[in-house]
């Protein structure tokens, strides 16, 4: 790709984001998500920034969105993104396996929540793929049965959905300081705000239904009547680094494992 093609591709992505109403909140997103409160936080922020480009970070987010979208599509419709025609086989590097439609889901009030989650996660996949254009990572091979639960009942579904949503919020929050483009930062901020709404609704549902969703790591705070939200001692959302997120979704593996048997696609794919 020559310089002219690169410039044209970048302009196309900028125009897409402007058309989606994102560019106008770029400075707000930067002010909210890129500010450090105190010298210690600034030192930590500087220490956790590996050499990832904005495209690398958005592709990292896209890999996570693929996983969430597949989970909600399978649990509500019993079909994958490819099966539903949302992406093509050529836009994947491996199949999505495991999982099934949750039995009698439609009889429960959580079905409304599940439908909304499915539709927004599908939209996030489409949004990030359009923003990245030809640089968008292919959907990797995904194993929805990595933890052995999530589909047998509504309670099992809530258990896994809560983990996905809280980790998703922390991933966007942790990646924000590494994004240099205010336009891309604003796009990530807008998605993170949606994921935060997802997290809150799922956590309340877990509490209301008496569902215990296990902690995924030492930072995680499962929902209880004492811990309604996933917050630190200062009532702030908890960020995770790329490595910390990968440790969770890879089930401890360095470059693959867990929900991604062959690893994610892109540059931000290994913990090291």
Image: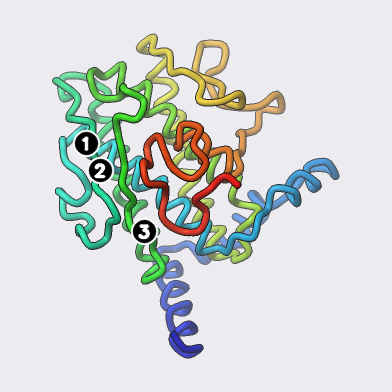
Count of labels in the image: 3
Q: Circles 1 and 2: CB distance less than 8 Å?
A: yes
Instruction: Measure the alpha-carbon separation of dots 1 and 3.
Output: 20 Å
**Which is nearer the N-term, disc 2 or disc 3?**
2
**Left or right, residue 186 beside residue 199:** right
Identify the residue at image location x=54%, y=24%: 229
Give the Cα separation between the discs numbered 1 and 2.
10 Å
Label 1: how many Cα within 10 Å (few below 14, some 14–19, many 20+): many
As helix, strand or loop, the secondary structure at mark 1 comes to helix
- Looking at the image, which residue is at 35% across and 42% down? 67
The tag earlier along the polypeptide, 1 or 3, is 1
Q: Are marks 1 and 3 in contact (CB under 8 Å)?
A: no
- Seen in the picture, residue 59 relative to 224 is either above or below; the reply is below
Query: Furthest residue to the right?
Result: 39
- Which image quarter holds the N terminus? bottom left
7 in relation to 151, above or below: below
What x and y, as percent, mark residue 66? 34, 47
Mark closer to the observer (1, 2): 2
Residue 267 shown left or right of residue 64 in the figure = right
Circle number at residue 127: 3
Which class describes the residues within 10 Å of circle 2: few (<14), some (14-19), or many (20+)? many
Q: Residue at x 31, y 23 (%)?
A: 148
User: In front: 265, or 168?
Assistant: 265
In the rendered image, residue 225, in percent from the top left (x then y), is placed at 51, 11
**Residue for badge 2:** 96
How far separated are the C-alphas under marks 2 and 3? 20 Å
User: Which label's residue is closer to the chain start, 1 or 2?
Assistant: 1
| Residue 90 percent coordinates (x, y) | 22, 62
Query: Which residue has dot 1 on it?
Result: 74
Q: Going by the image, does 230 lie left or right of 116?
A: right
């Amino acid at each position: 790709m020559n310089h002219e093609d690169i410039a044209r591709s970048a302009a196309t992505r900028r125009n897409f984001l402007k058309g989606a109403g994102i560019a106008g909140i770029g400075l707000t997103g930067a002010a909210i998500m890129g500010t450090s409160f105190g010298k210690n936080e600034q030192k930590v922020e500087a220490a956790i920034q590996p050499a990832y480009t904005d495209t690398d970070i958005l592709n990292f987010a896209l890999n996570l969105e693929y996983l969430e979208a597949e989970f909600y599509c399978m649990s509500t419709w019993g079909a994958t993104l490819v099966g539903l025609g949302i992406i093509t086989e050529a836009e994947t590097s491996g199949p999505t396996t495991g999982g099934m439609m949750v039995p009698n889901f439609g009889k429960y009030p959580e079905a409304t929540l599940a439908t909304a989650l499915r539709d927004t996660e599908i939209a996030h996949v489409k949004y990030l793929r359009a923003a990245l254009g030809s640089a968008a990572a292919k959907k990797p091979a995904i194993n929805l049965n990595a933890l052995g639960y999530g589909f047998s009942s509504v309670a099992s579904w809530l258990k896994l959905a809560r983990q996905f949503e809280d980790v998703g919020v922390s991933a966007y929050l942790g990646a924000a300081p590494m994004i240099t483009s205010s336009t891309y930062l604003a796009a990530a901020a807008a998605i993170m705000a949606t994921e935060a709404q997802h997290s809150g609704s799922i956590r309340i549902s877990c509490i209301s239904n008496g569902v215990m969703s296990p902690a995924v790591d030492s930072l995680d705070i499962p929902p209880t009547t004492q811990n309604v939200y996933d917050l630190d001692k200062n009532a702030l959302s908890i960020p995770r680094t790329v490595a910390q997120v990968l440790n969770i979704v890879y089930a401890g593996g360095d470059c693959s494992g867990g929900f991604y048997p062959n690893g994610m696609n892109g540059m931000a794919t290994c913990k090291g």
